[in-house]
Image (tube, rainbow, N blue to C red):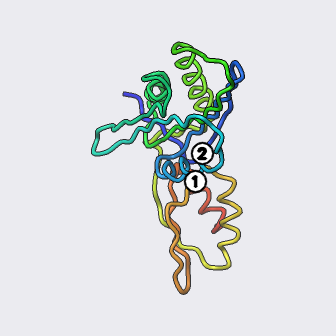
Amino acid sequence: MASHLTILTATSRTYDIKKSRFIAHLVPLAAFPSALKQLRDEHKKARHFVWATRHLHDQQIEENCTDDGEPRNTSGKPTLNALQNRDLIDIGLVTVRYFGGIKLGTGGLVRAYSEAANRVIETARLIAVDNLYRQTIQLSYPQFRHFEYLIGQTDLHIIDKTFQSCQIDVTLQGPKTAIDRLCTKLNPP
């Protein structure tokens, strides 16, 4: 069985068809609620905010989607299908639609939302969930600035930061080899 895939960083892509604009945003599931709120705030004139999520919980995949006012099963379901087809989990996909005045019809909507979803997935840096690894590292306060520079050059995700009196404990998530490389750069032999 193939490994499930996910992302660590959000990505977006725009798709225009018949004067309608579809802006698809692929985000880690943990960031999904705040990303949806932020998109609604940023795109006040958009007509629809169609979304789908997939989450692995107790060895079961939980899925959800909404058409957000589009005709039933013309937008949320095609968006969810795009996530299913690539076996993506722990992820959310929101497509912001600006209506361009030309009706696309039900088939046209299905194709447009599918295309927007597939384009943003193609753009994303997908990671096999099996390769994800968590590790907590301890940094001195003088090391922290160098750490922030190095972390910006990786696909690692900071899960938690705890500031102690003499050190900073940082929990990272990502491929073990990337965490090991980062630790080597922070503490050369």
Q: Residues within 10 Å of mark 1 (few under 14, many from 20)?
A: many
Alpha-carbon span between mark 2 and mark 1: 13 Å
Left or right for 121, reference 146: left
- Is 114 above or below relative to 169? above
Q: Earlier in the sequence, mark 2 or mark 1?
A: 2
The number of numbered badges drawn on the structure is 2
Question: What amino acid type is highlighted by mark number 1?
Answer: Leu
Residue that label 1 marks: 156
Q: Nearer the viewer, residue 8 or 79?
A: 79
Query: What residue appears at the point 50 percent right and 48 percent down from the top-left corner?
Result: 32
Dot 1: element: loop
Judging depth in this view, the residue of 149 and 62 nearest the camera is 62
In the rendered image, the vertical position of residue 104 relative to residue 40, given as above or below: above
The N terminus lies in quadrant? top left
Q: Is residue 58 left or right of residue 10?
A: left
Determine the image quadrant of residue 188. bottom right
Q: Residue at x 65, y 72 (%)?
A: 144
Percent x, y of residue 143: 66, 74
Q: Amino acid at mark 2?
A: Ala
Q: Residues within 10 Å of mark 2 (few under 14, many from 20)?
A: some
User: Camera-side residue: 41 or 86?
Assistant: 41
* Labelled disc at residue 103: none
Residue at image location 52% in from the left, 19% down from the top: 110
Q: Residue at x 54, y 44 (%)?
A: 27
Q: Position of residue 116 (x, y in %)?
A: 60, 27
Quadrant where the C terminus sits is bottom right
Q: Circle 2 is placed at which residue position?
A: 10
Residue 150, quarter of the rendered image:
bottom right
Is 22 placed above or below 143 here? above
**Residue 126 x/y as whole percent:** 55, 37
